Amino acid sequence: MCRLRACLIPTPRRRQSTSAGGETLRTAAFDSIVGFVGGTLAKTTIAPEGNAGTTYFGSANYYQDFAGDRKSLFTDSLGGTQSISTKNIGGFGELSLGVNYVRILENGPGAAKQLNANLRVDTRFGKNVTKSASITAQVRLSF
């Protein structure tokens, strides 16, 4: 249910884990309701020969978890139980910068017809999210 990069994505979940010692953690069914909004600015340049292009981009997204608390029941190996409640992640932001490159190949390796490459750096931040960053790089040949 996405329009103009604004989305609401409900996802029902239920989980159970069992350890080798016989303990179990059973998570009650819940709906994960995450909405997000974002935007991207991009600039593309085409090589003078017309056989390659480079796109530089920056994007910003904000995600919000609208679901209620998650309820779980821990059962130890002796049958004792403990109820556990976990709050949702709340809201967090993500910033991205990157570059995409494409080139039409003549006599490419292995008769490849096109080369695509991209590099992007992402960072996430929020009250309940540990600051993190990632780097993604990809090279693809199309035959």
Image (tube, rainbow, N blue to C red):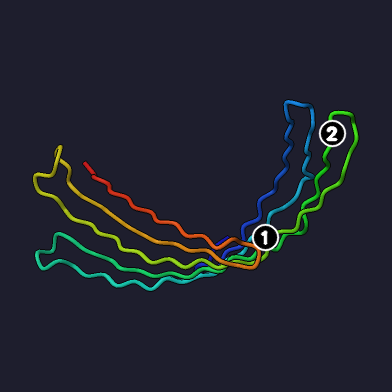
Which disc number belongs to residue 67? none
- Number of residues whose C-alpha sits closer than 10 Å to that of mark 1, classed few (under 14), some (14–19) or many (20 or more): some
Check residue 76 in the rendering and tell me which mark sits there, or answer none. 2
Along the viewing direction, whichever of 73 and 53 lies nearer the viewer: 73
Spatial CA span between label 2 and label 1: 27 Å
| Quadrant in which residue 53 is drawn | bottom left
x, y percentage for residue 24? 79, 34
Q: Is residue 122 above or below residue 107?
A: below
Q: Which mark is residue 89?
A: 1
> Is 107 left, or right, of 98 in this rendering?
left
Q: Up-down: is 93 above or below 138?
A: below
Cβ atoms under marks 2 and 1 closer than 8 Å: no
Q: At x 40% / y 61%, what residue is drawn?
A: 121
Q: Position of residue 114 (x, y in %)?
A: 20, 49
Q: Quadrant of the C terminus?
A: top left
Residue 130 higher or lower than 143, as above or below: below
Q: Amino acid at mark 1?
A: Ile
Compare residues 8 and 131 and report the one nearer the observer: 131
| Viewer-nearest residue: 45 or 89 | 89
> Which amino acid, by three-letter code, is at mark 2?
Asp
Identify the mark nearer the N-term, 2 or 1: 2
Tag 2's secondary structure?
A: loop
The reply, left or right, for residue 29 in relation to residue 118 is: right
The answer to which image quadrant residue 55 occupies is bottom left
Q: Nearer the viewer, mark 2 or mark 1?
A: 2
Query: What quarter of the picture does the N terminus occupy?
Result: bottom right
Q: Residue at point 81% right, 49% down?
A: 71
SS class, disc 1: loop
At a point 51% along the width and 66% down the height, the residue shown is: 94
Is 33 displayed left or right of 97 in the figure? right
